Image (cartoon, helix red, strand yellow):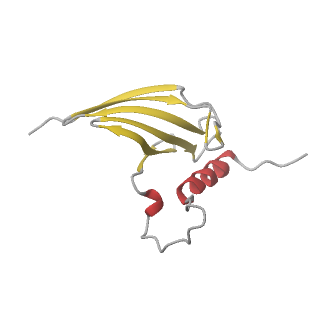
Amino acid sequence: MRSRPPRHLLLTTLLALILCGNANAEGEAPEEAPPFTVLANVTISCSAAWPSTTIGCFIERPVFVLGGLELAVGLDAQAVITGGLDAAHLAPYGILAYYAGTWSAWLEAQLPELASIPTIGSPDWLRAGFTLRIPP
């Protein structure tokens, strides 16, 4: 019987590979890149919940921006420190967002696969949200 690595180890490994990935144009010698170039124009949001000991991170990179409208791709990773792995997941998302002066709204749809990263676990297939900042 073949032993399989725990899901949280797989999630952490995939997340690290995405953050570390970098490509150079064919035939170009690699230049000395400033720190965190791989993360340029990437948004990373993380949160933790207690007592469920759930940790989640969302990595998002814009693909197309037109004024306040943005189309992006993202990767959602959630791990549970204690208890079972049923709540853990890794899923790529397509995001459509609108950013205005004091508010923003977004719609996220789970993608079947992104850059060979499959969906692991049971994430939500559709999510929506908004932010509102009350001016002084």
**Which percent across, then down, holds residue 12?**
60, 52
Q: Residue at x 57, y 58 (%)?
A: 21
Q: Residue at x 60, y 56 (%)?
A: 17
Please say if 40 is above or below 117: below
- Report the residue that reaches farthest toward the front: 27
| Total labels drawn | 0
Please say if 87 is above or below 2: above
Question: Quick one: quadrant of the N terminus?
Answer: top right
Q: Is residue 125 left or right of residue 105?
A: right
Q: Is residue 17 left or right of residue 43?
A: right
**Which percent across, then down, holds residue 50?**
45, 43
Q: Residue at x 60, y 62 (%)?
A: 26
Please say if 100 is above or below 36: above
- Report the residue that reaches farthest toward the left: 136
Question: Quick one: quadrant of the C terminus?
Answer: top left
- Report the residue that reaches farthest toward the right: 1
| Image quadrant assignment for residue 28 | bottom right
**Which percent across, then down, holds residue 38?**
48, 60
Who is closer to the viewer here, 29 or 54?
Answer: 29
Who is closer to the viewer here, 105 or 79?
Answer: 105
- Report the residue that reaches farthest toward the bottom: 32
**Which percent across, then down, holds residue 53?**
51, 44
Who is closer to the viewer here, 72 or 84?
Answer: 72
